[in-house]
Image (spheres, helix red, strand yellow):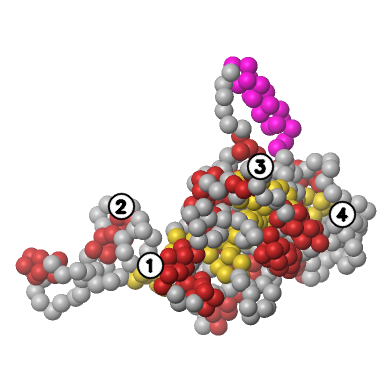
């Protein structure tokens, strides 16, 4: 047991606990005995925590997770890391364990008094099991919309466990990972040219969808292209193959065999497209620098890739004369994965580094690989986040102010708002999806991020002012995303969950008909 006369910081307290974790001894507690113990290293310390996957602080933790680098060294033990919210409640109630009484009052996740409200999904008037308010248990003056006068079911009666944090209010903007690309990272929302959906959101007939293929950017690498020594046929091959599979090719660039230029272009293209394909520069010679450049762009270390090393031996033989070439070609970015996409046992794999696919520049090899990749992009979701569809009973005009506020506070999430005409219940659908790139976009809610008219006018005026004063600055929209601005799926999911919680707390009382997860269309 350790106590302190005065308050102590969290990190300092942990440091003291770790440094004084010596074994109990039977000897008399004297200064000499204490000094003798201090000469020995303290025993390792572990803390048993209730962290679960999906918690904002969970990160990539498993059951065993060492402490963060800025804390004293100890081991986190997370026995319930993979439990769902429902499993937690099953355990508590099965063994009749005590818990905070607020969970019986509709609270599902407890923060501070300023950011915690009962979960809207547990409002008795919202569950619609009956129209009789007295049978539902609501107050006599309940407005029937889940407002402040309504009563709530206990937390363990939550139907959708993923709504666990829906009662947490996020009022402050979410801090970006370390960098914001530009002011254009705000999401455009309620403009008159939003695509109108069909009348019935539950009809399975044809309609506009919120999910689409990944937007692709192509980088062709080679001095021979820029010098006119070789015709660029790979762009045409990529455009044809991608179009055949309904995968949009958004832009193409050609760069020289310069490592810094390639890295800069990869990072720029990542801020504009969901997927980046490179062509050329992957051989063993001095001018084949694409792989090294991609590692630089992503902030990855170059490491020996054992699978690639073995593949090269299998393909080329274990000839000592080729050892230098094999070593270069098997030294890859740390995030590298070998993708076998055709099922052919003799296939040479495609190299994937996060959302960058590195293809050979030889036209016949490139064409076969891009065809396989186009099919792969069509049939898989590349690092897509969890998505939500919030179905509302109110008109779109009623949510303009709260929605725009949530959009501003969550730049890492893409929002869409879609009005429905003449539907008896549903009037508006709001969609949420995480962005892969901090400040970038997702194709599903519109490729190009538009700023509001007022913000655009202000930027134009500022640019004109700088021009009149001969101030030379790089264009705002050409800022490059560093590697740490690429969100992992877990980070994207956390961003979306926080945004959903914020949105639900700001929407008009009783306007939420339902919240649906991972839907593939508006209807």
Q: Residue at x 48, y 72 (%)?
A: 309
Going from the N terminus, do you reach mark 2 or mark 3 first? 2
Gap between marks 1 and 4, in whole Å?
Answer: 49 Å
Q: Earlier in the sequence, mark 4 or mark 3?
A: 3
Foreground: 428 or 227? 227
Element type at mark 4: loop
Q: Which residue is mark 1?
A: 66
> Which residue ends up furthest to the left in the rendered image?
32
Which disc, if any, is residue 18?
A: none
Mark 2 = which residue?
7
Q: In the picture provided, is 358 more to the left or to the right than 389?
A: left
In the image, residue 31 lies in the stretch drawn in magenta: no
Residue 167 rendering spot, x and y as whole percentages: 62, 58
| Residue drawn at point x = 28 percent, y = 59 percent | 15
Neighbours of disc 1 within 10 Å: few (<14), some (14-19), many (20+): some
Query: Is mark 1 in CB contact (under 8 Å) with mark 3?
Result: no
Image: magenta residue range: 451-469
* Residue 186 badge: 3
- Quick one: label 1 or label 3, which is nearer the N terminus? 1
Indicate whether 434 appears above or below 66.
Answer: above
- Per the image, the residue denoted by label 4 is 197
The mark lying in front, picked from 2 and 3, is 3
Q: Is residue 240 left or right of residue 459?
A: right
Note whether 497 is above or below 439 in the view shown: below
Q: Position of residue 60 (x, y in %)?
A: 49, 65
């Amino acid at each position: 047991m350790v106590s302190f006369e005065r308050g102590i910081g969290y990190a300092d307290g942990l440091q003291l606990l770790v440094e004084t974790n010596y074994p109990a001894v039977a000897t008399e507690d004297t200064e000499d005995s204490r000094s003798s113990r201090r000469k020995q290293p303290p025993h390792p310390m572990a803390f048993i925590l209730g962290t679960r996957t999906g918690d904002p602080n969970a990160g990539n933790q498993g059951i065993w997770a060492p402490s963060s680098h800025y804390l004293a060294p100890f081991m986190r033990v997370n026995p319930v890391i993979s439990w769902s919210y429902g499993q937690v409640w099953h355990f508590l109630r099965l063994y009749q364990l005590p818990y905070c009484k607020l969970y019986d009052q509709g609270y599902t996740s407890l923060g501070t008094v300023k950011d915690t409200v009962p979960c809207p999904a547990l409002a008795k008037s919202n569950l619609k099991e009956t129209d009789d308010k007295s049978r539902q248990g609501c107050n006599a003056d309940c407005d029937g919309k889940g407002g402040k006068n309504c009563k709530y079911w206990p937390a363990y009666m939550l139907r959708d466990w993923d709504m666990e944090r829906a009662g947490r209010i996020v009022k402050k903007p979410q801090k970006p990972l370390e960098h914001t690309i530009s002011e254009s990272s705000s999401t455009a929302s309620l403009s008159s040219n939003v695509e109108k959906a069909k009348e019935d959101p539950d009809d399975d007939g044809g309609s506009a969808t919120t999910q689409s293929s990944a937007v692709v950017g192509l980088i062709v690498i080679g001095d021979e292209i820029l010098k006119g020594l070789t015709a660029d046929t790979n762009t045409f091959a990529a455009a044809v193959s991608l179009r055949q599979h309904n995968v949009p090719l958004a832009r193409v660039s050609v760069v020289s065999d310069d490592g810094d230029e390639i890295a800069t272009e990869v990072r720029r293209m990542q801020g504009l497209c969901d997927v980046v394909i490179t062509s050329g520069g992957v051989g063993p010679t001095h001018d084949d620098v694409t792989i090294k450049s991609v590692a630089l762009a992503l902030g990855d270390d170059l490491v020996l890739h054992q699978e690639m090393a073995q593949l090269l031996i299998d393909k080329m033989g274990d000839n000592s004369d080729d050892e230098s070439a094999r070593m270069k070609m098997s030294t890859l970015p740390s995030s590298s994965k070998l993708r076998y996409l055709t099922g052919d046992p003799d296939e040479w794999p495609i190299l994937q580094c996060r959302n960058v696919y590195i293809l050979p520049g030889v036209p016949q090899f490139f064409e076969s690989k891009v065809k396989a990749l186009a099919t792969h992009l069509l049939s898989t979701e590349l690092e897509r986040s969890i998505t939500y569809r919030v179905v509302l009973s109110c008109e779109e005009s009623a949510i303009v102010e709260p929605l725009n506020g949530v959009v501003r506070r969550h730049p890492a999430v893409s929002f869409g708002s879609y009005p429905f005409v003449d539907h008896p219940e549903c009037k508006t659908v709001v969609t949420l999806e995480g962005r892969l790139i901090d400040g970038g976009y997702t194709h599903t809610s519109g490729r190009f991020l538009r700023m509001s008219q007022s913000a655009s006018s202000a930027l134009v005026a500022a640019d004109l002012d700088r021009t009149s004063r001969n101030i030379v600055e790089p264009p705002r929209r050409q800022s490059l995303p560093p590697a740490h601005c690429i969100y992992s799926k877990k980070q994207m999911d956390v961003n979306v969950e926080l945004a959903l919680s914020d949105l639900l707390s700001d929407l008009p009382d009783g306007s939420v008909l339902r919240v649906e997860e991972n839907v593939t269309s508006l209807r």
